[in-house]
Amino acid sequence: MEIISNWGVVFIVLALVFGLYMTWGIGANDVANAMGTSVGSGAITVKQAIIIAAIFEFAGAFLAGGSVTNTIRSGIIDAAPIQESPELLVYGMLAALLAAAIWLMVASTKGWPVSTTHTIIGAIVGFAVAGIGVDAVQWGKIGEIVASWLVSPLLGGLLALLLMMSIRKLIFNTDDPFQQAKRWGPFYVFLVGWIVSLVTLFKGLTHLKLELSTGASLFYATLFGLACAALGKWMIDRVERDPEADREFHYASVEKIFVPMMIFTACAMAFAHGSNDVANGIGPMAAGIDVVRSGGEVAQQAALPIWLLLLGGTGIVIGLATMGRKVMHTIGTRITELTPSRGYCATLAAAATVVLASKTGLPVSTTQVAVGAVMGVGLARGIGAIDLRVIGSIILSWIVTLPIGGVLAAIFFFIFRAIFG
């Protein structure tokens, strides 16, 4: 307790600095891969991706994210042994933030789309083993995370493949694909608005203290979906056939119709990521600050005040703008060739999977879902359409994320304990 009172201000400043660094890494990596399909397909520019992320990441975190966060990330470790030494938790949260931020920075410079959630979990496990003991780690939870390496890409890939097959049947494999795209386009936009809003309403808008019944949620989600469809129809109706472009590529005019549709999916993906990952990313920062403010009490949950979400959102947008291009390039162009229609399927599949997972509690990774969704639209054209070497390097980066985060966090934990203890 004495250490907390003596160094409290320093701990809060470090938590804010490391937390901002960590959210910068989330923007450079996690948000970059979330927006990579939209940019890689040519539907939106990098500048537009940054603007969309700035608005919808925060909206997702504020409306559909939690107002509180588990101080011990997802029950990964048992905090009981350190109730009498709360400074150890502060060292651990600072170490986890710094370790995760450094690994995200390294991965982003290499263009590796790694998982922010798994990075921070690996870091917290590393601190727990170093500072509390091996028995403090809930190893069953770690097993669930490892299983999600398979589940996340499969869910995203399967949904993307099904969407791509439906678009082929209803639009591309018809006598007049351009007219069919105009006919079915508003329905696919409706799907975007309906799925994202429905799951958001099912979760409950905690910050607005709004809890709706299943029937009311379905009603309002349908209204929102219809509003999106009406706006989508207005945008799609403005697209005109381009005979010149069609001579070079038979479906050029059809792909132009999917460009405005991709704006909706880009917004949905940013919202989905914000609801699932942003609060988790700044959770350790909230946990460390909460312990200091309470005078050393280790609570099961810590509040996520609005200013902390704003700080996280700021870091994310800066990270995407300054270092997000390499990861966007990996997701958007290196795995498989993306057109607006393929990008639409991949992005909607990823967004739907993430928001469904955040509703059901499935431990999926936004990154892995996005990669799986891109693979799914690639598989629609056959295995030869996917660059397996790129997939191999991505999977390797996923595997090393947990141990690297853990080792770095353990090292930083010992450094902080030596400095302040």
Image: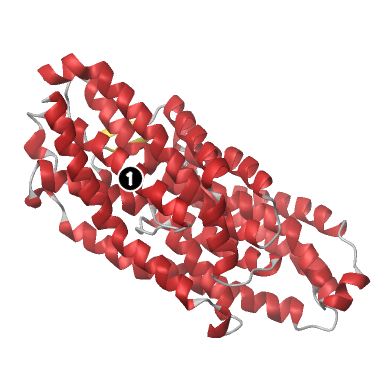
Disc 1 residue crowd, few under 14, some 14–19, many 20+, Cα 10 Å: many
- Report the side of 343 relative to 180 (left or right): left
Frontmost residue, 134 versus 238:
134
Furthest toward the top, the residue is 6
Task: Say which residue appears at 36% left-offset and 42% top-offset.
Answer: 101
Residue 349: give x, y in percent of width and height. 55, 64
Image vertical order of residue 117 relative to residue 10, above or below: below
Residue 83's quadrant in the figure?
top left
Give the residue number, with chain letter if any, for mark 1.
100
Frontmost residue, 245 versus 52:
245
Image vertical order of residue 326 relative to residue 94, above or below: below
| Count of marks, rendered view | 1
Residue 70: give x, y in percent of width and height. 28, 40
- Report the side of 299 relative to 164 (left or right): left
User: What amino acid is labelled 1 in the image?
Assistant: Ala
Residue 356 seen anywhere in this rendered image of the structure: no
Secondary structure of residue under mark 1: helix
Image vertical order of residue 85 relative to residue 99, above or below: above
Looking at the image, what colour scheme do you see? secondary structure
Which quadrant of the rendered structure holds the N terminus?
top left
- Report the side of 216 relative to 308 (left or right): right
Image vertical order of residue 287 relative to residue 151, above or below: above
Task: Say which residue appears at 55% left-offset and 47% top-offset.
Answer: 271
Task: Say which residue appears at 42% left-offset and 47% top-offset.
Answer: 277
Frontmost residue, 334 versus 252:
334
